[in-house]
Image (cartoon, rainbow, N blue to C red):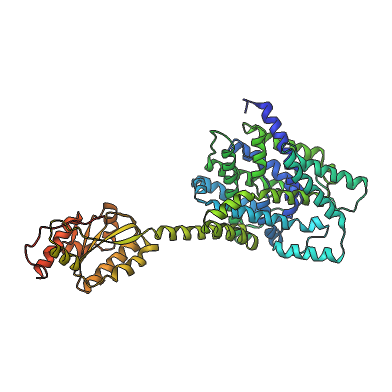
Amino acid sequence: MGRSPRRDLLAGLTVAIVALPLALGFGVSSGLGAEAGLATAVVAGALAALFGGSDLQVSGPTGAMTVVLVPIVGEYGTTGVLTVGLMAGVMLIALAALRAGTCMRYVPAPVVEGFTLGIACVIGLQQVPHALGVPAPDGDRVLVVAWRAVAEFAGNPDWTAVGLAVSVAVIMLVGARLRPTLPFSLVAVVAATVLTQVAHLDAAPIGDLPSGLPAPSLGFLDPGALGSLLAPAVAVAALAALESLLSASVADGMTVGRRHDPDRELFGQGLANLAAPLFGGVPATGAIARTAVNVRTGAGSRLAALTHAAILAAIVFAAAPLVARIPLAALAGVLLATAVRMVEVGSLRAMARATRSDALILVLTAVATLALDLVYAVLIGLAVAGALALRAVAQQARLDRVPLDRGDHSAEEHALLAEHIVAYRIDGPLFFAAAHRFLLELTEVADVRVVILRMSRVSTMDATGALVLKDAVERLTRRGILVLASGIRPGQRRVLDSVGALEPLLHEGREYATTPEAIRAARHHLETAGILPAGSGRGGTVRG
């Protein structure tokens, strides 16, 4: 942190200016109040910066976490949220100990894009009541709450809050295009606050803020009630891990030669979430927008994120009365603009055009985020992505009939061989997703006397594939067809042995190292059975 302190201090100041209205807004949206957002930004921001795995990550309250917290507040109250934060912190530390941070690399890009799009929609809908200047209606579904707020506004419209919210959002969006380095969010919020005070506009302010970091007033739930909070805590921990690791990856991508430690990042976020509730804060994660601002303004070490937390702490202690006068509609405008800026139209268009599977995963994840909750959305996205990936891999498995070469046989002899012997080459994976199609194709073979299975090109095999192969051999044998196998590799042999698929082949000596050996054995069988004249040829090979 001592390499370029001046640049880090400037970056920390810039991030704090950007983070102030966001911390206030996310605190209000969570249902715990603006002071909870500030406490989270200060405490979690400092601890995650010190103990996390990224030098440039900035942590604090985020819109995605707010989406998860709203139903928890509605069902369990403030006490439940604080307890969930502690439980999630313990879970994150446990994940770090289990070295689960590397699992982030297995989350497909369409799931991340759909997840982000859904979060942006939810954040925007959450701001509708404050943007319209009406009390937030009851309910835990953002679509229902937003619709009720619109209906209440239509019955008694007051355009003051609407004007403030729209003005703040427009200033932020237009200003970001013209001068992306300037903190237009703070400029817009200050302007809206001054306007409401000077013109005495009827706009609801944030309300009284404590002159210092708040402490939880309701304590924590009785240990006997922790069981009911286990599922919400798992959801919070999963989201904190996912968003924090995603944000750290974004920071790596914006720099050269920097790589975060995912397990240490989980540990730092765990400590942050253990400490934040002790000061009345909400669960925290790495914040992608604030991390991006930190990198773009030249941050080079953890000093920048620590400076951001220190400046916000100074604001809490020194300027709480001023902050308390900020209109809720102005913060709603900040979050509406934030939601719009979260949507990367270019990335969505590219993902939708890539493949139909990518487009489907993206849409399903976004819709599930909006209709259900974030953890279910990610699980649904991962499940669909996994199913489609398995389907694509399974389609690569092929069962090709390979023609016999004429070799040193006469045309008549070759015709006899081709009439009674068929060779199949199995290409690709033979596992549960493709095995039954393979069984259907193999057992529909025409009425021949010998089937040779070439196994050398099987890329992978599981127990289901081995059982299906065993079943196919038994079915063909019952039809009086001799089955020979060639080219079985050691890895395949272990799986086949485990289910007993090799027993009939080994018992009767029907497994060969190469295909020519299998063809000679097939010819000998046909000669012994009197189907081919004895000694009419010396063998042959197959193509492919």
Placement of 121 over or under 210, stated as above or below: below
Q: What residue is rendered at 47% in x and 61% in y?
A: 387
The answer to which of 535 and 70 lies nearer the viewer is 535
Q: Position of residue 311 (x, y in %)?
A: 74, 36
Q: Is residue 407 visible?
A: yes
Q: How many marks?
A: 0
* Quadrant of residue 416 within the rendered picture: bottom left
Q: Residue furthest left?
A: 535
Q: Residue furthest bottom?
A: 479
Placement of 463 over or under 474, stated as above or below: above
The answer to which of 142 and 439 lies nearer the viewer is 439
Q: Position of residue 474 (x, y in %)?
A: 25, 70
Q: Is residue 239 visible?
A: no
Q: Residue furthest top?
A: 3
Q: Quadrant of the N terminus?
A: top right
Q: What residue is rendered at 13% in x and 58% in y?
A: 539
Q: Position of residue 28 (x, y in %)?
A: 76, 52
Q: What residue is rendered at 90% in x and 53% in y?
A: 202
Q: Is residue 174 left or right of residue 264?
A: right
Q: Quadrant of the C terminus?
A: bottom left
Placement of 284 over or under 395, stated as above or below: above
Q: Residue furthest front?
A: 411
Q: What residue is rendered at 88% in x and 43% in y?
A: 194
Q: Position of residue 533 (x, y in %)?
A: 8, 67
Q: Is residue 497 left or right of residue 182?
A: left
The answer to which of 277 and 236 lies nearer the viewer is 236
